[in-house]
Image (spheres, rainbow, N blue to C red):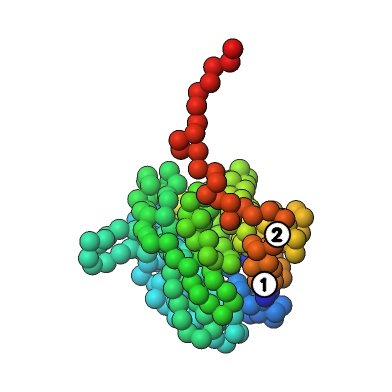
Amino acid sequence: MKIATAAYPLSWFDDWAGYEAKLTTWVGEAAAQGADLLVFPEYGAMELASLAGAEVCRDLQRASQAVSDVMGQVAALHLSLAARHGVHILGASGPVVLDGGPGNGRIVNRAALYTPTGQAGFQDKQIMTLWERTPWGVEGLGPLKIFDTALGKIAVNICYDSEYPLLARAQRAADLLLVPSCTDALEGYWRVRIGTMARALENQMVAVMSSTVGACDWLEAVDTNWGMGGIFAPPDQGFPGTGVIAEGQMNQPGWTYGTVDIDAVQRVRSSGNVRNRAHWAEQDTSDSVELCPLK
């Protein structure tokens, strides 16, 4: 399959038509290059707060509610574009305010996967960064999921989640791990990238990272953005020796493309030069660590 992963700048929209035109252009461009799977970044949907006006954008909670209020329309547009172009799309994540039930009023960070045949599913972020916790008040919500699609089994770790190996380990049956990210500094980008590449190595899967890029000075949550697209694999037979299938240029908006053979994932798991995935349990050192003073 061909994968397109985004370095995505956030825009101000005066109306819904502006957002629809932007997304239609981005999806159309990737589809025209033959992409089968499109990956948008974490908090890319925050640009939709602009539809509620500048005053709302100055209030983080009101901005989150404004984005949440239009996520139904966002889903309909993504499904329409996925069907039109015959592609799978991981939409940009955004805050969703849960209504009803025990989670009433909670904010989660949700990314949705859309198929060309009209199905959709979502993954919520599990572990929040310090700033998401306070002052934003975003909360983690399980469960972790694996989506069984025509392209293979797909899992999602949203940004900071990729830095915690047990999450992706729980999703180890997946062929592809999608990592939508939003980072505000070079070191933030590299923390997520290192985590993404490590998850590809440990679980012998392909991991795809997307990023928000550029300035968005009208919305505190995403005011500064560093990153680029990247597609990573276990550095073993059938994949590049560097583990890098494709990478973009830092902070340059646009798509990064790479071709992935899903069968190669299964081959490296069964006959690769190493067996990180299969040998995982051998690292259990809970009862075997001793403090040994030097003599």
Res. 276 in view: yes
Q: Position of residue 127 (x, y in %)?
A: 42, 51
Question: Residue 243's quadrant in the figure?
Answer: bottom right
Residue at the spot 71% in from the left edge and 78% down from the top edge: 33
Mark 1 and mark 2 lie on one chain; the one further toward the N terminus is: 1
Residue at the spot 45% in from the left edge and 77% down from the top edge: 120
Q: Position of residue 64 (x, y in %)?
A: 38, 60
- Judge depth for marks 1 and 2 and give the one in front: 2
For the C terminus, the quadrant is top right
Residue 208 lies left or right of residue 135; in this view the side is right
Contact between marks 1 and 2 (CB within 8 A): the answer is no
Three-letter amino acid code of the residue under disc 1 = Asp
Q: Counting other residues with Cα less than 10 Å from the Cα at mark 1, is it few (<14), some (14-19), or many (20 or more)?
A: few
Q: Position of residue 287 (x, y in %)?
A: 45, 35
Residue matched to label 1: 263
Q: Which is nearer the eye, 171 or 215?
A: 171
Res. 255 in view: no
Residue 54 lies left or right of residue 198; in this view the side is left
- Could you say which disc has been placed on residue 279 in the image? none
From this view, report whether residue 108 is shown above or below residue 146: above
